[in-house]
Amino acid sequence: MSDETKSEFIHVVSSNLPANGVVSYNSGFSILNFNIGQQDRVLYPSTLRLNFKFNIMKPNGTKAELNDFVGLEPCMGVYSILEQLTFTAKQTNQTIEQIEHYNRFLSSYFKSFNDTQDFFTNRSMSSLAGNSGGAISNNLSSYEADEDQDGSMDVSIPLISGLMSSSNNLPLSSQYGIGGLLIQLNLANDSNVLYDITNVDNVNGFYYEMTDVHISAEVGNPTKKQLSRFMKYPKINYNSISSYNTTLNSSYATINFNLGLSRVLKAFVNIIKSNKLNSYENGLSTDGIPSTNVDSSNLVKINKIEFLKGGILSPLNYEIRDNNDNQELQDSQMIRNFINSIDNFDDRNSKNVLDLISLSRNQTRTRGVENLPGQAFGIGINYDKISNDGVDFSGVQFGLNISSDFSIDEPQTVYLFVQSRQQIMYGPQGIKVNK
């Protein structure tokens, strides 16, 4: 192999690790910073992974056991602990991509990009995800029984984002690239990550802990062809995720945001009861709106939704109505649009665990434990499935109206995620991010 194509793996430790190397939100440690310095090489985004050893701890500081019945959101696994992901150009300190409520975004994303076999195989091994809330307990059991393990669970996960899902190699040079990359991870509150799978409130005070935390990635020298392209076309196009949140507490909810984005591709929302957040009640579930504040086993019927651009119906010039009172599912067009709003986020063929039970308004229906992704409620729209050029929201408001049978005083938190096409322009003077 010639020098100009030679590559190697790098191992980057967080620049702000505590002295003992143990990372825990419980001890006041909520941010991890990883610095990949400027160099005349390129980063291969698909190889970037976050690696660590993971433990769940009891309030007394000992490790959780199988019979503690502590769970993580099944489709998420350890991704549950990541509250926010930020990529910054190190030399100029400019934000390239920032995904707030990152774990909420992934709670819908994973259900649209993994099938049951994924949760039994690679996702179970790499991120401790599973087919049910008890999967983490099973992992605890298997690691306790392994004499070669210290009880910690090994984790290696890609940092899913628009930038890291791009097919473009990232030049790290200050002359023909972004001038190095700073990766910042904000960790989530223990009470929003862990929950009691038996629903008897036995895990209050439990917390998660991480050791041997580092990022690995592959970097290489650019080929002559790549170097010529970097010099001639000093720009990188990529998809990015932006997030917003608000509260819903009426039968007719109007959601408006100034996105400030010029090339919007897709948008979707997921919803959760506000009192489930930070309460050891699985704050990452995508339940939808419950019909009562006592029993959330049945979901509210959505009668009508409208997507608006500057107050005008768009991209659909009509409202979507559900006129079938006897139907347990949402309107089929609502479901199709929601799936299309996440589908092909990173240009892969989609596979999912969405089915008639996880999308049903009647959550008292049961299934076998071999396929238990939980509720998967969402509302979404695809603005541009053909040209990938997007719709301009830089000067007009995004709007979503939701009319439903909601009739109780029980605030619901609504998370909106918007995928847009963005561009980095770089040079010796720095970078510019066009949104």
Image (tube, rainbow, N blue to C red):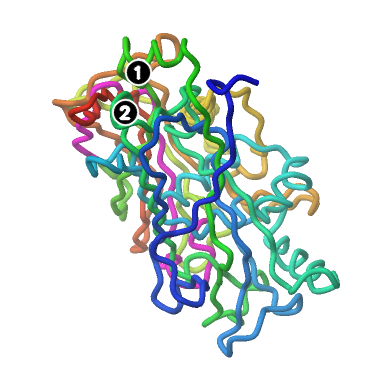
Q: Residues within 10 Å of mark 2 (few under 14, many from 20)?
A: many
Image location (x, y in percent) of residue 151: 73, 73
Image location (x, y in percent) of residue 288: 48, 49
Q: Quadrant of the C terminus?
A: top left
The structure residue drawn at horizontal position 45% and vertical position 52%, both measured from the top left corner, is 289
Q: Amino acid at mark 1?
A: Leu
Which residue is the site of mark 2? 307
The answer to whether mark 1 and mark 2 are in CB contact below 8 A is yes
277 and 273: which is toward the camera: 277
Disc 1 secondary structure class: loop
Q: Quadrant of residue 105?
A: top left
Disc 2 secondary structure class: strand
Q: Can residue 323 be seen in this snapshot? A: no
253 and 369: which is toward the camera: 369
Ranked by sequence position, the earlier of labels 1 and 2 is: 2
Q: Can residue 97 be seen in this snapshot? A: yes
Q: Amino acid at mark 2?
A: Phe
In the rendered image, the vertical position of residue 396 relative to residue 109, given as above or below: above
Residue 264 counted in the magenta span: yes
Between the C-alphas of marks 1 and 2, the distance is 7 Å
Q: Which mark is residue 316?
A: 1
Left or right of 405: which side holds 312?
A: left
In the rendered image, the vertical position of residue 112 relative to residue 33, given as above or below: above
Q: Which residues are magenta?
A: 256-284
Q: Residues within 10 Å of mark 1 (few under 14, many from 20)?
A: some
Residue 58 counted in the magenta span: no
229 and 258: which is toward the camera: 229
Image location (x, y in percent) of residue 353: 67, 39
119 and 78: which is toward the camera: 78
Left or right of 320: which side holds 371?
A: right
Residue at the limit of the structure toward the front, as seen here: 3
Image location (x, y in percent) of residue 22: 52, 73
